[in-house]
Image (tube, rainbow, N blue to C red):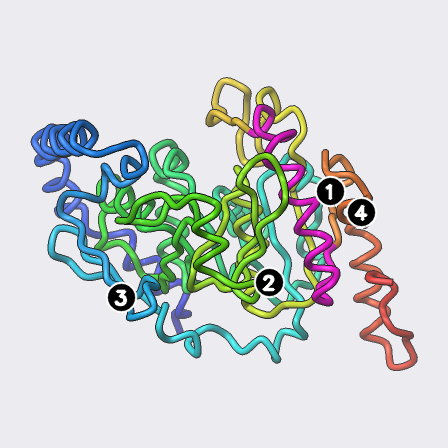
Amino acid sequence: MVSEGNAIRSSCAVVEAEQGARASKSPVRRAGNTFFKLLYRYTHTRAWRHNERLAHAVALERDEAGRLTGMRIRGRRLACVNAQMALLPDLRDAGQECHLIATGPSVSAIDYRALPMPRVLGVNGAIALTERQGVRFDYYCIVDTGFVRSRPDLVERVICEPLTLFTTPLVLWHIAEHIGLEQIRCRVFLVDDMLFPAGRRAPRARELRETYDARTLALFDAPQPLGFSLDLRRGVFDGRTVAYTGLQVLAALGFTRLYLHGVDLAAAKRTPRFYEETVSSMQPSYLDENFRDFIEPSFRHASALLARSGVAVRNLSMESALGEDIFPKLRWQTLAQAAACESEPAAAASPALV
C-alpha cells in the first residue's frame, strides 16, 4: 500500500506540462511584475514599499481583528488554516516537546536515527534531512524570499510534504512565481511580519505598544525594534534569522520543551550549511552582519521571556555563537541516552532539562 507521504510526493512529481506553460509565460510575467513593482515603489512612501510585490494580483483576507486569514494570487485562493488551529496536531500527544532544526553545519554530526523526536519543526533547507536521515517534519518555517529564489528544489520538497508550513504572503508570492501554487500539498498558516505587515504600512514601535498588550507581544527595550510575538495570529518578529521565527511559532503552539539544532550562527559567510557541498554553492548569508545588533539580543531577550513562561530551551549546537547564558547547551548524545533510559521501566526522569 502506498503511504500518504509517498502519494503526496508522487503527485508533486507530475505537472510537467503545467510547468512548461508557466515557463513560456515567465518572460511576459516577469516584465509585468517589474513594471508594477516599480510603479508601486515610486508612488508610495518607504513605510509602504515592503508591499511592492503584493500590490498587483494579490488579495489579502483579514478578520475583524485585522489578523490574516487567507489570500489570493492571480485569482487563485490558497487554502489556509489560520482560522482553524484545531487542524494542527494535538500537542498533548507530543509530550509538549519539539525539536527545531536549522541548517548550520553542526547538524551533520547528529545521528537522527538514534534521536527520538516527538515533533519536529524545520526551517529552509532542513528538508534535506528527510532523504539523508529519514527525518519527518510536522511543521516548517520559510520567511526568506531569497531561499525560495535560490533553492526552489528544496522548497518544492517542503510544500509536497504532509506538514504545516508557517510562511508570509510574500514568500507565497515567490512560491507562486518560481514553483507554482498547484504544487502546494501541505497546510499553510499565513504569518504576518510585525514590523512589515502584508498590505499595510510599517508601524512605528510606539504604535505597536499602543495597539497590542503584553499578552500579544513583548517589545524589548533595545536600540533596535526587537520583540517576541506571543500570538502567532498577530504576527512574528523575524530577528534576522528564520530560526527566531521558528522559536516564536513553537512557543505560540504551546510547546514547553524545545531543542535547537544547527543554530550555529558562526562564520556563516564562509561556512556552508549542512546541505551545501562547497563555499561556491552557498546561498548568501547575512547572519554575521546582523548577529550583534539583531540576532544575539533577540535571542537573549527571548530566553528570559521564555524562562519566565515556563518554556525550557536547550541548544544542541556546541559550536553555536549563542552563549550558554542565553540557552544552555546539550550534546545530542546525552539527549539520545536519556531517551533510551526513559524507555526502561525503572528509569529515572530524564536529566536533559535539569
268 horizontally vs 235: left or right: right
Q: Which residues are magenta?
A: 287-313
> Which is more N-terminal, label 3 or label 4?
3
Number of the label disc, if any, that sits on residue 251: 2
Q: Are marks 4 and 1 in contact (CB under 8 Å)?
A: yes
> Which is more N-terminal, label 1 or label 3?
3
Amino acid found under the numbered disc labelled 1: Ser
Amino acid found under the numbered disc labelled 2: Ala
Q: Determine the secondary structure under disc 2.
A: helix
Measure the alpha-carbon separation of dots 4 and 2: 19 Å
- Residue bearing the label numbered 1: 317
Number of the label disc, if any, that sits on residue 329: 4
Q: Determine the secondary structure under disc 4.
A: loop
Crowding near the residue tagged with mark 4, few <14, some 14–19, many ≥20 C-alpha atoms within 10 Å: many
- Residue bearing the label numbered 3: 79
Q: Are marks 3 and 2 in contact (CB under 8 Å)?
A: no
Tell me which residue sits at (58%, 75%) in the image. 91
